[in-house]
Each structure stands twice: as structure tokens, then as C-alpha cells.
Image (cartoon, rainbow, N blue to C red):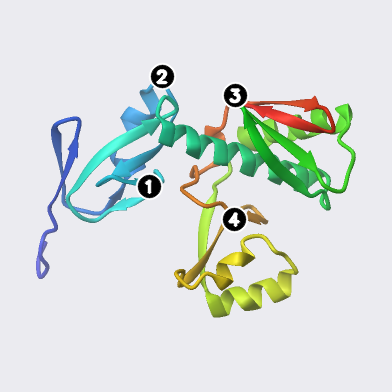
Amino acid sequence: YEGRKCLLMKINYKEKIIELNEKKTIKEIFEKEISENENIIIAAKCNNEIVPLNYEINENANIELLDLRTKEGMRVYRRGILYIMEKAFTNLYKNALISVEYQIGDSLFCEAVNIEITDEIIVNVNNEMLNIVKKDLPIRKIQMTKEEATKFYEENKSNKGKLQLYAKEKEKVSLYYCEEYFNYFYGVMPISTGYMKKFKLEKKHDGFIIRY
């Protein structure tokens, strides 16, 4: 490395040390481990902070990979399922307003504010979710200054994540994009739609449940 200092980082994983001399994402470092694991690895802990798999390591770190057997991994999975469900509704029923009401065991109960949920809608949305998963579309986190976000909300006439504008402790506004669809979720998200392989929508009362 002529003319520049060589960067050396030590990654502690399962009591083993991995040495890096360049910045890499967690997914790049543990590509074999993630692809061959029988459980879905969906996120990671880096120095005890939960991070997405595309998080770039630029310092010494203790790493733990999170699969669906962990509480943290399952929370990320649930966010991903909800994100895909809402994208599917937007693709098929653009003006539908969906609210997540509460958890029932390993399911989430949801209602539609402005449309009647029918068996046909459930079948269509479930199939669209499967299609979105099959495409393995990237989920990208986009950050804006509050000035940029103010202009964004004026132009897009949307309230998704808009409350961030009024949070004094936040300097930036974050949105998660997948193709042209965007939404806000508090917490780490999966890096693509292909991770959410197991789910099922079922009509229940005036709404529906998402089994995961």
C-alpha cells in the first residue's frame, strides 16, 4: 500500500479472530456462513448494536449473527413481513389504509380503515407478497435532512414517517425504499425482500391476520 497506511481490523466471531485490511459488509465477511446456515440469518449484532447485514465494518468489532431463533432476529423478520404486506397492498389497492392492531401468538392482526377485506383481496395480496419475496428486491434505507424531508413531504403528499420531522432528538429523517414504494419503520430492517420466506395471510373477523 504505497503512500498510505494499511488498515487492519480484528473481527471477533464465535471466539475466533478474523483479520481484515479493508472495509467490508457483514454479509460479505460471513457470506458462506449466511448462505449455508439452515436457519435464516437476517441481521447481526456489532459491538452489541443490532445492525443490518449490509452494515460496513470499519473498526475492531465483536459480531453475532442473528437468525429467527433469536428475539432480535424475529423482530427484524416481523418488520420485513409487514413492509412486504403493505407494499403488496399498495401495488394492488393503492388507496388502502392498513393498520396493525395487535399480536396473537405468532400472528399479527390487521384491519383496513377504508376498504372491506374480502377473501379475494386476501388471496391477491398473499400472492403478491410471494411474488415480491421471489424477486428478492433490495430494501434501501434513505436518509434526508429535515429541510430535504420537508420538501419531500410537500411534493409527495404522504404522511409515512412524517412525525420524524417533529422529533427534536432526530437530526435526519429515514425512509425504507423498495422500488418506488417507501415507508418508515422504527428499527433495523432486512436488506431485501427475499429473506421473508414463511408467512400466510388469513381473513379474520373484519380484518386479517399474518401468520409468520
Looking at this view, is 203 or 152 the one in front? 203
Left or right of 212? Residue 18 is left
Question: In the rendered image, which residue does mark 2 sit on?
Answer: 38
Considering the numbered disc 1 on the image, is that residue within a helix, a strand or a loop? Answer: strand
**CB under 8 Å between callouts 4 and 2?**
no
Q: Is residue 112 visible?
A: yes
Question: In the rendered image, which residue does mark 4 sit on?
Answer: 184
Specify which label sits upstream in the sequence, 3 or 2.
2
- The picture places residue 155, in percent across and down from the top left corner, at 72, 74
Left or right of 64? Residue 11 is left
Instruction: Tell me the distance, in whole angstroms, between the alpha carbons under discs 3 and 2.
Output: 24 Å
Q: Measuring 39% from the left and 48% from the top, which residue is drawn there?
A: 54
Specify which label sits upstream in the sequence, 1 or 3.
1
Specify which label sits upstream in the sequence, 4 or 1.
1
Q: Which labelled disc corresponds to residue 151?
A: none
Q: Badge 1, how many Cα within 10 Å: few under 14, some, many 20+? A: many
- The picture places residue 116, in percent across and down from the top left corner, at 90, 39
Disc 2 marks a residue whose amino acid type is Glu
Disc 1 marks a residue whose amino acid type is Val
Question: In the rendered image, which residue does mark 3 sit on?
Answer: 105
Q: Badge 3, how many Cα within 10 Å: few under 14, some, many 20+? A: few
Instruction: Tell me the distance, in whole angstroms, between the alpha carbons under discs 4 and 1.
Output: 16 Å
Question: In the rendered image, which residue does mark 1 sit on?
Answer: 51
Q: Measuring 59% from the left and 24% from the top, which residue is drawn there?
A: 105
Specify which label sits upstream in the sequence, 2 or 1.
2
Disc 4 marks a residue whose amino acid type is Tyr
